[in-house]
Image (cartoon, helix red, strand yellow):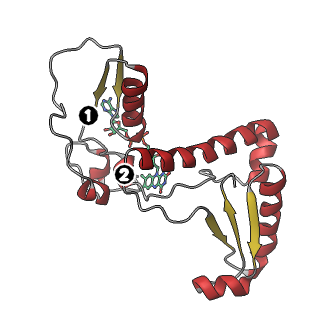
Amino acid sequence: MSWYHATMYDAGRPAGSLWEETAPALADGADLGPNGDDVCDIAIIGGGFTGLSCALHLARDFGADVRLLEAGPLGWGASGRNGGFCILQPTGLSYDSMISRYGEAEAKRFVASQVEATRFVRAFAEDEKIDIEPQGEGELHVAHAPSRYAGLAHERDVLNRTFGIAARLIPSSKVQEQRSCGGGAEQWVPGS
Ligand SMILES: Cc1cc2nc3c(=O)[nH]c(=O)nc-3n(C[C@H](O)[C@H](O)[C@H](O)COP(=O)(O)OP(=O)(O)OC[C@H]3O[C@@H](n4cnc5c(N)ncnc54)[C@H](O)[C@@H]3O)c2cc1C
């Protein structure tokens, strides 16, 4: 059984997205059709974030002759449905579990790559003049109940000590003032 509607898997019936609707039109002269020229340095399959970014950087930064092959409209897949969060920890694992499963060195490499990725997205949007409406410099992790606050204090310590990420605890009263939710919270700024 699938969690999503069947159209989610069918490139022939693409659902529109906010990103598509609010994106500027493609540049004049953009060549989207097959041109019969099937010889290139590099063929990239898939026109979501990964393929498009790969194609752009290979062509622009390395002068490669690139073709991008997409089964549906560009950005049709997960990239078009993205929530727009550009944040760390894209995994269900806690930092402790990550370290015990993969070791501290590997966990550090992973977290560093996430910090780099968030910086890359921001710098890329600035360079390319893409109006992504960035919201703040950090994240707010909220404790859903007072008992979760201690867990956030521990996470703050791990972030500070092991990963060198500035994190601080915000008392519950302050969070309630700002966000009308219970418990306490933790905030960090990537790499600051
Ligand atoms: C609902 C939702 C919300 C999300 N929210 C966030 C978020 O807030 N923050 C975040 O960081 N991540 C989020 N993600 C994850 C993120 O969107 C994906 O990790 C990212 O878009 C993946 O990009 P991609 O280019 O690898 O894949 P996709 O965007 O899926 O692109 C793959 C493309 O390859 C094409 N393709 C596949 N096979 C072939 C083939 N054989 N021939 C030709 N073309 C082919 C597909 O048609 C598709 O267009 C979200 C994902 C979903 C589904």
Answer yes or no: disc 1 within 8 Å of ligand 1.
yes
- Give the image quarter of residue 140: bottom right
Q: Tell me: 152 left or right of 61.
A: right
- Name the residue at 24% across, 58% down: 21
Question: Mark 2, residues whose alpha carbon is within 10 Å: few (<14), some, or many (≥20)?
Answer: few
Q: Amino acid at mark 2?
A: Ile
Residue 103 rendering spot, x and y as whole percentages: 80, 38
Upstream in sequence: badge 2 or badge 1: 1
- Name the residue at 76% across, 72% down: 169
The answer to whether one can see residue 182 in this image is no
- Secondary structure at badge 1 equals loop
- Name the residue at 59% across, 61% down: 137
Vertical placement of residue 36 versus 58, above or below: above
- In this view, the residue farthest toward the top is 39
**Quarter of the rendered structure image containing ligand 1:** top left
Residue 189 rendering spot, x and y as whole percentages: 66, 60
- Name the residue at 42% across, 44% down: 127
Residue 109 rendering spot, x and y as whole percentages: 71, 38
- Give the image quarter of residue 37: top left
Q: Tell me: 137 left or right of 34.
A: right
Vertical placement of residue 151 versus 58, above or below: below
The answer to whether one can see residue 177 in this image is yes
Provide the residue designation for mark 2.
Answer: 130
Provide the residue designation for mark 1.
Answer: 71
Answer yes or no: disc 2 within 8 Å of ligand 1.
no
Question: Mark 1, residues whose alpha carbon is within 10 Å: few (<14), some, or many (≥20)?
Answer: few
Viewer-proximal residue among 186 and 128: 128
> Which numbered mark, 2 or 1, is in the foreground of this view?
2
Q: Amino acid at mark 1?
A: Ala
